[in-house]
Image (spheres, rainbow, N blue to C red):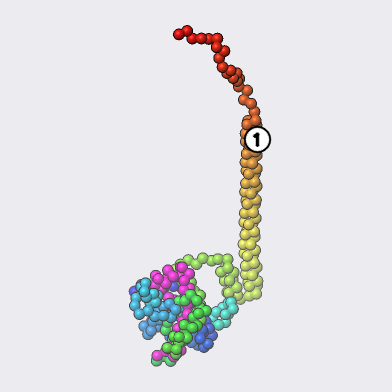
């Protein structure tokens, strides 16, 4: 069956839970080592709720995809540097992709069994998409009470990106990449820092020029509007003055003398 695989993205970090317990470092490495879809395939759901029927208007809590593969590696930069992270690759449904494009359910939370079946080690048994990681703790406690061996992790924000898609390198990603790489010499690191600063300075300078140009254009437009208003006011004043002058001026046409009646000198002979 053909799959639409995503890129690997982080779904959990050691030590982060929502119910007061701790996800141990070795659990993440064990989950990455042990995960096998033929043994047990973890499915993706919404808010750790498993639907009883296919997706429908009355039952939206169905399955939204499958976990294809897992891997574990240490985080190399940022506030979580040095901590072990668990990364997942998914085969999402069209419904999940549509939700992600709408910025809905953009966080993920793992469900882990620390003593799975006959393995005796940690295993990923589910993955949930959620919108509100702050409220996930209460829901997770309810599920943990029913399956006391399962843990629900704190939610991690994610973005669905498929394999083979060209990566768009933003200025921020370029700078982050420069600082994230392992460098062999201090000179190379210093050169990267200088280059990053130059990139940022150039970007800021261009932004400043763009803003200045916009201000000049705005000032010119305001001046043109003021001049047009002045011309309109002057034209209106001239029309009003001409109207008043014409109203007060005699037109000079000759007037007929008013009639005073007949003198009686002309009599009709009947």
Q: Establish if 238 lies above or below 142.
A: above
- The answer to whether residue 33 is left or right of residue 251 is left
- Image quadrant where residue 37 sits: bottom left
* Point 52% across, 79% down: residue: 134
Where residue 57 sits: x, y (%)? 37, 72
Q: Residues within 10 Å of mark 1 (few under 14, many from 20)?
A: few
> Please, is residue 209 above or below residue 67 in the view?
above
Expressed as whole percent of the image width and height from the top left, the position of residue 236 reads 62, 39
Q: Is residue 64 above or below residue 256?
A: below
> Foreground: 262 or 231?
262
Q: Residue 15 lies in magenta, yes or no?
A: no
Quarter of the image with the C terminus is top left
Q: Nearer the viewer, residue 4 or 160?
A: 160
Element assignment for label 1: helix
Tell which of 228 and 63 is nearer to you.
Answer: 228
The answer to whether residue 68 of the structure is visible from this angle is no
Range of residues picked out in magenta = 89-117
- What residue does disc 1 label? 241
- Mark yes or no: residue 269 visible: yes
- Residue at the location (64% across, 34% down)? 244
Q: Residue at x 64, y 59 (%)?
A: 208
Residue 4: % across, % down: 40, 71
């Amino acid at each position: 069956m053909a799959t639409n695989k995503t890129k690997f993205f982080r779904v959990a970090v050691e030590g982060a839970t929502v119910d007061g317990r701790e996800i141990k470092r070795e659990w993440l490495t064990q989950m990455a080592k042990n995960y096998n879809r033929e043994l047990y395939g973890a499915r993706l759901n919404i808010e750790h709720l498993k639907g009883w029927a296919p997706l429908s208007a009355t039952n939206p809590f169905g399955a939204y995809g499958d976990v294809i593969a897992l891997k574990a590696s240490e985080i190399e930069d940022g506030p979580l540097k040095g901590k072990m992270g668990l990364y997942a690759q998914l085969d999402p449904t069209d419904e999940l992709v549509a939700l992600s494009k709408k910025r809905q359910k953009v966080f993920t939370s793992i469900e882990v069994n620390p003593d799975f079946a006959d393995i005796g080690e940690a295993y990923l048994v589910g993955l949930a998409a959620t919108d509100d990681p702050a409220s996930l703790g209460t829901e997770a406690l309810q599920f943990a009470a029913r399956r006391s061996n399962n843990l629900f992790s704190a939610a991690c924000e994610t973005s669905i990106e498929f394999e083979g898609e060209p990566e768009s390198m933003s200025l921020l990603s370029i700078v982050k990449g420069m600082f994230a790489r392992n460098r062999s010499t201090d000179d190379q690191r210093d050169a990267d820092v200088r280059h990053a600063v130059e990139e940022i300075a150039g970007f800021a300078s261009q932004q400043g020029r763009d803003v200045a140009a916009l201000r000049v254009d705005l000032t010119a437009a305001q001046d043109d509007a003021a001049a047009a208003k002045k011309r309109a006011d002057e034209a209106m004043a001239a029309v009003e003055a001409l109207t008043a002058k014409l109203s007060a001026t005699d037109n000079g046409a000759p007037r007929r003398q008013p009639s005073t009646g007949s003198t009686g000198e002309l009599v009709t002979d009947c």
